Amino acid sequence: MKHSIYNNAFVTLIVFLIVLLSGCQSMKNVTPKENIEEPKLWSVLKPLSQEERVKQHQYIDTVVNSEFPIKGLTDGYIILTTGGPNLYEELCMRELLQLSDLAPITILIAGLVSPASNSFFDKIQLPTNVEIVKIDRNGLISLGFDEDYIEIEKYYHPAVWQIEKGIIQNQYLYYVVGQYADIYEHFTNDDSMISPIQVGQPLQKLYLVQARGQERELVQIDRPTLLILWSFENSNALLQTFLDYFQNKVQIFLVLKTTDIRTRYPVLLEALASSYDAEDRIEWKYIESMKNQTSVELSNINNIMKLYPELKIYEDQNHEMIRRLNSLQILHYSLMKGEDRGVMLYSFYLFNAKSILVKDWQCRMTLGNQEDRYEMLTILEQAITELK
């Protein structure tokens, strides 16, 4: 009896082992190898190399007190425009034509569009002291435009120069609609003339708008400060990583690019709503896109303010960062790659307690693995340590 029990137990054990082994064999064919993890791609920030930074220059590089690159123009104001069917630029030009009360105006029309599209200048009565001059590709290149940008019409913002005997007396680049009072003051008050800040120079007259309350404020720095210029095209989580990591190491000023959602889009939507020829306007096709982007970005701004109630958050509503820190927000075509999720630039500026710009970095959002996700954190931390 006992022998029979042992035999049955032995047979059961053999059957169990056979089933177990056969099961393991079938699993072996479908189970992926263990302990071999495929690399995970992250959104990472990587600083541009010096060579890349040279390519990533602002598209107008004229300098006050230098000769204006285009010869034979009348003394007074020179305004660069595309002359195309762009409602926003038309609205800017309607404002800028008020400068004709102060001095003659030469309107430089970039030769990118067909004469048939110059409807704005065809349908209005220009002041008698306004002249229209069309310039070609070489004229744009002489102003500092990169050849590869010339066909990208959407990147143009009206620019204004004041010249006397061919010499630039004053300039105002990247005009935004609704700024005529500012530009009038700029051209009539010598104290208002400002130039871009370079490394080693103090921050002067940088006016930004507070995200909370929307008051315009002169940015003042009296202790070591990391100023971050950010765009919401990509990961909010990455921005929060920077804020969480550095908020106890250095004073942080966050500047958000809001020119479109705070100034350009509202003006365009209002103008399109009352325009008799709205259907013919290129902006008409993008109304829903404007509304959606505005909603998303306002939501992002509110979330950041809730997460960081003590953080100093500004909005760049009038291209002040471009004017004062050369932070053009488009990326040169040669720096783009097919696998990138975005082609915006993200900039970091480190100031000492005397408000002098010590170091600056222009970065691009790209794809990378976990090991280089924190590359920019390490670079900034080292710079802040050296500063202290």
Image (tube, rainbow, N blue to C red):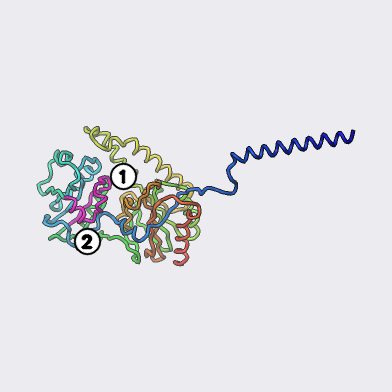
Question: Residue 153 versus residue 161: which sits nearer the camera?
Answer: 153
Residue 122: x %, y % from top left: 14, 40
Residue at the spot 31% in from the left edge and 41% down from the top edge: 265
In the rendering, which numbered label is found on residue 311? none
Q: Callout 2: few (<14), some (14-19), or many (20+) C-alpha neighbours within 10 Å? A: some
Q: Is residue 19 visible?
A: yes
Specify the segment rendered in magenta. Answer: 136-162
Amino acid found under the numbered disc labelled 1: Thr
Q: Determine whether the residue tagged by mark 1 lies in a helix, strand or loop.
A: helix
Residue 150: x %, y % from top left: 24, 49
In the rendering, which numbered label is found on residue 263? 1
Quadrant where the N terminus sits is top right
Amino acid found under the numbered disc labelled 2: Val
Q: Callout 1: few (<14), some (14-19), or many (20+) C-alpha neighbours within 10 Å? A: some
**C-alpha separation, residue under disc 2 versus residue under disc 1:** 28 Å
Give whichever of discs 2 and 1 has the lower sequence position: 2
Residue at the spot 17% in from the left edge and 41% down from the top edge: 114
- Label 2 with label 1: CB-CB less than 8 Å: no
Say above or below: 169 vs 159: below
Residue 157 on the magenta span: yes
Residue 81 on the magenta span: no
Q: Is residue 374 left or right of residue 332?
A: right
Report the residue marked by disc 2. Answer: 64
Q: Is residue 139 left or right of residue 333?
A: left
Say above or below: 275 vs 162: above
Residue 310: x %, y % from top left: 47, 52
Question: Residue 246 versus residue 21: which sits nearer the camera?
Answer: 21
Judged from this view, the residue extending furthest toward the left is 128
